[in-house]
Amino acid sequence: MLSRVADSLYWMSRYLERAENTVRQLDVTMSLVLDAGGANAEARWRRMIAALGSPAGMDWSGGLEEMAHRLVFDNLNAASVTCCVNGARENARQVREEISTEQWQRLNRLYHTIHSAQTQAQFDSSNGDVLASILDGVHLFKGVTDTTMIHGQGWQFIRLGRYIERAYATATMLEVYQPILFHMQREHTGVEYLELVGLLRCSTSFEAYCQVYTADITPDRVLEFVLLNRDFPHAIRYCVDSIRQAIESIERTCGRRSPGALTAGIGRLHAMLDFTTISEILGGDTAGFLHTIRQQCLLIHELIYRHYVHYSIQSALAV
Amino acid sequence: MSAGHSIALETLFGDYPLDRAFDEMREPSGTLRPHYRALAERLASLPADELQRRKQSADLSFLTQGITFTVYGREEGTERIFPYDLLPRLVTAAEWDRIERGLTQRITALNLFLRDIYSDGKILNDRIIPRELVYSCKHYRRQMRGLHVPRNVYIAVVGSDLLRLNSGEFVVLEDNLRVPSGVSYMLTNRRVMKRTFPELFQSYGVRPIDHYPQLLLATLRSLAPEGRPEPNIVLLTPGVYNSAYFEHTYLARQMGIDLVEGRDLVTHDNIVYMRTTDGLRRVDVIYRRVDDDFSDPLVFRPDSALGCAGLFNAYRAGNVTVTNAFGTGLADDKAVYAYVPRMIRYYLDEDPILPNVETYLLSEEKDRQYVLANLEKLVVKAVGESGGYGMLIGPHSSKRQREEFAQQIAANPRNYIAQPTLDFSRSPCLIGDRLEPRHVDLRPYILFGDKINIVPGGLTRVALEKGSLVVNSSQGGGSKDTWVLE
């Protein structure tokens, strides 16, 4: 597979994952603001922006509605949902011959939905519906991706993009929320309960959490679930498992071995999540642990690029 | 309308005008040409709204397949659906036979001409074509001098534009020897038409064109450098912003080859590689859809990032085939065009089967004076342009436009040619719920590998605006499926 094609598929997938994450966090923030008590709109906004990786140009300017509108529709801010969808579509367009017609049509439809004046007008009256329809669009795209595309190298790069983005974004979010949540009293108030549920909903984990732990929601279990659950697709450990599988599969279809550093990087991250208990994480440097996850994700991305996409010609000729 | 036509046919035709221009469907008396009879009867037998329903279903088919092109000069990357007409244009076996022989002859001569110009220049020494005309051509590439080209094929993929004059005779309007486009529309039109009129298609005995991608692949393979039995063939595209990007992805997919951009290619020791996730992979044949100027910044335009640095040297070394060859635009220069009949006589010692359109060279004193005095009757074209840009259509022009062109001609006469305004043929199109005649041309696609292959058909381009003579897709033209009959 052409390196450029792998690159485009990877970023198409990352951009969509980013759009989805942004939409979900915004949705949760907008609904939390409605509840009395707890942090005010400004504090929540700042926290959410930090959880999204502190993109520029999203500083609080006074109106939540206006800020939300900007975060979804601002064509000039790379962090906006619109820009993420644009990025995904632009990447897809460059590899039009590699993806299925169904994928292209779904993505195109999502693109046209988000760009229509009607959607923007509707957002001001019922933002929840608009956010839900964007999420639907993303989910449909992922569905047809899994059902209409050969699960070959291209699909693995799509998977890689999705899970690297998700692991990174989830770790960022937990890092921002952990000082607030995990130093709570054991007996928490109603407001704290809402915060924890909000955190779970940011990663669509609420219902899944309840199935595992019942609705008895405590900070340590929340962290354990989002970080260490191995069966839930939004848990970081699941993401890392998927990243490892994708890399192994790419390596197999390529017929050349990944460099040792890449294997070691993914192995280290995997082991971190496999062999650490939640009490050790909470007892030690929690922020440091989450930070290490992010650093490892960046490193893995970098190594994948150095080996499969932007390799130097000298190194490739030497083989 | 003559007697014997059904009422439905009368309604369909309405006040369908017939005049001097050749009508593809009807004779001057109004009777249907024999080979169009079945089509007309079929149309007349359909319930009134059935035609519209089929049109809508065909529309939808184009839409969902994303068959679009990009219009320049508007917002960057504006995608549009290529407009098309539902009724096929029919070409009889006898007509096609002449076209096929004529094009084969013409392309053979043009290829010999390119080879001659880039080697000994015999035709110049024999003073058949003025030397300065060739050397002043915008698309002449001195880098090609003395370079051996695989199988001596310079032009592997050609699309020549034909018109049918009032007499019914086909003439060649121009040859596209650089990067002719539109073949994907020919193929998708056919697919949609088969679905729209299956019974009619079957009853007509239409010669197939669907194997074009396979023929193209075989042509490219036949031009691979020696000693590369399993050549790696790629299609080089300028990228998503190119107007023909859809076609590039379409052809790559149909041939099962990689679609590459300049940034995917690297050269080392005069070998071209593409960057894959498996490492570098050698490239043997490049079907180039990037203009000469943008192909290699080391040799051509240094500011272009669309091509691949070092490509030309690898080509010169014979390690990679690039097709069409560089510098082929020399032979489709509109001033050189005027000499093609002489080339055919010179190289092949034959009379041209398909004539040229009469052409005035503005670099010639006598021609220039005539043209300047008769601008309102003529079509003036810039020699190096294509796609309907840089053109003055005399009868449809304003006094100011004519004055502007007269000034430009005076400043650079070599850059322009003039031709009489042609009354070329018209074909019935479905406009609303009626048939109306619209001007059409025909662009067959010629492949030149170990031999010349022309798939029977081509792209019939239609000037969809009433009375318009411009068929280019960039200027509001559309297309029709072309049925060559057994």
Image: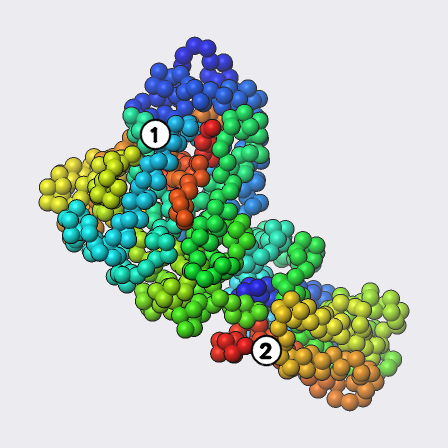
Looking at this view, is B142 or B424 the one in front? B142
Q: What chain is tagged by disc 1?
A: B
Looking at this view, is A195 or B62 the one in front? B62
Q: Secondary structure at mark 1?
A: loop
Residue B306, how many percent across, how many down? 41, 63
Mark number, residue A78: none
In the current view of this chain or complex, which residue is farthest to the top? B3
Mark number, residue B425: 1
Q: Is residue B266 visible?
A: yes
Give the residue type at disc 1: Ser
Quick check: B22 above or below B474?
above
Quick check: B134 above or below A285?
above
Looking at this view, is B180 or B466 the one in front? B180
| Residue occupying image coordinates x 41% and y 73% | B269
Q: Quadrant of residue A252?
A: bottom right
| Residue occupying image coordinates x 41% and y 36% | B460
